[in-house]
Amino acid sequence: MKFLDLAKVYIRSGSGGAGSVSFRREKYIEYGGPDGGDGGRGGDVVVEAVDGLNTLIDFRYQQHFFAKNGQHGMGQNRTGRSGEDIVLKVPVGTEVLDEDEETVIADLTEVGQRVKIATGGNGGFGNLHFKSSTNQAPRRANPGQPGIERTIWLRLKLIADAGLLGLPNAGKSTFLAATSNARPKIADYPFTTMHPNLGVVGVDGKEFVIADIPGLIEGASEGKGIGDRFLGHVERCAVLLHLLDGTSETIADDYQTIITELENYGGDLAAKPRITALNKIDALDDEEREAARFALEKASGRRVYLMSGVSKEGVQNVLRVLQAEIAEGRQAEQAPAEDEPWRP
């Protein structure tokens, strides 16, 4: 299945049915009076997050979604049937954006979460509604209200506990394959990963989800490469794992390149908890490892973990650190705010 994380959709809610102008006509009833029914209500357009989807590929083949119109009112005081709603089923983690691609209408982060993005028009009143003591035979009815037509964007942001960052060929896909059942494409050339991959990782009897995105390059925030398109997929992560190629001769520059792109991307992505790991240490001897670690710790100002996705050396230690950061982040989210009163 092809991965698609952005789709433009045209929607229109149903128009309300028109009211009816009708009069009661029965034998032996001289003054039957008005009996025109109201029009039915138009259908709504609803977006719902469902389980079992992980891409917006369905919206590539169908971009127009129209709810049903309400039925017109009829004689004998019969109200028209309401139009059926139309439901757009999307993966969990989908954002609904306005036509400007910036205004967030809704953020669907849980299964079953629904949001109405276009309300159907109300049905018009029939002439029975206008009957009064001074106007016992009204000959007017209201038309139904028109539906709402608009253009929206659907943007998918994968929900994962941890996200992988790094330059192309930093070993992100190898790390994901070594720690989970995910089977991303692995090769010895840059930009092997063309779309995000998810993997469920287990350590010490606990599981969490890791997201691997295409590698970033210098100038990604300005549109170079493809990695910047997928940075949104790690915005929801509790912690980021920054992998660096231990065999690179410019480790400090490689580190700064990724940090600069995170800062230029905006939001709070650069401020997220981040673990720095030096990968591919299986290709280095002890002296080279220490030299690379020293250079990276000096550039980052933080602790650096050594690991190898191929030999799996140090991988479990990195996973335990990630798990600890994730647990701490979840605990902070569940803790009540200081201004909120305590509740049992």
Image: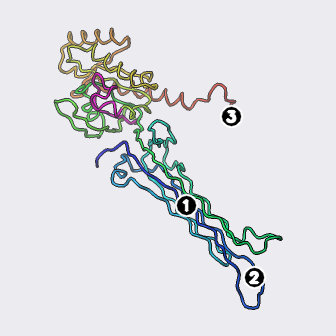
Residue type pointed to by label 2: Gly
- Along the polypeptide, which appears first: circle 3 or circle 2? 2
Q: Do tag 2 and tag 1 residues touch (Cβ < 8 Å)?
A: no
Crowd around label 3: few <14 · some 14–19 · many ≥20 (10 Å): few
In the image: residue 279, left or right of residue 198: left
Name the mark on residue 15. 1
Which amino acid lies under the numbered mark 1 shown in the image of this protein? Ser
Q: Which residue is mark 3?
A: 343
Are the residues flagged by discs 3 and 1 in contact, CB closer than 8 Å? no
Q: Residue at x 31, y 44 (%)?
A: 3
Observer-nearest of 92 and 65: 65
Q: CA distance from mark 3 to mark 1?
A: 46 Å
Closest to the observer: 203 or 252?
252
Residue drawn at (16%, 30%) of the image: 188
Quarter of the view holding residue 239: top left
Q: Which mark is residue 116?
A: none
Kindly report the distance in space between the C-alpha atoms of the residues bearing marks 2 and 1: 31 Å
Q: Residue at x 67, y 74 (%)?
A: 36
Q: Amino acid at mark 3?
A: Arg
User: Which of the pair 9/300 is nearer the observer?
Assistant: 9
First-in-chain label (3 vs 1): 1
Closest to the observer, 118 or 5: 118
Q: Is residue 59 left or right of residue 329?
A: left
The mark lying in front, picked from 3 and 2, is 2
In the rendered view, tell whether residue 20 sits above or below residue 266.
below
Looking at the picture, how far across and down is residue 146, in whole percent? 56, 58
Residue, disc 2: 32
Give, as a single range, the part of the protein colored magenta. Answer: 207-230
Query: Disc 2 on helix, strand or loop?
Result: loop
Q: Secondary structure at mark 1?
A: loop
Can you give x and y, in whole percent of width and height, for residue 331 in the image?
A: 53, 29
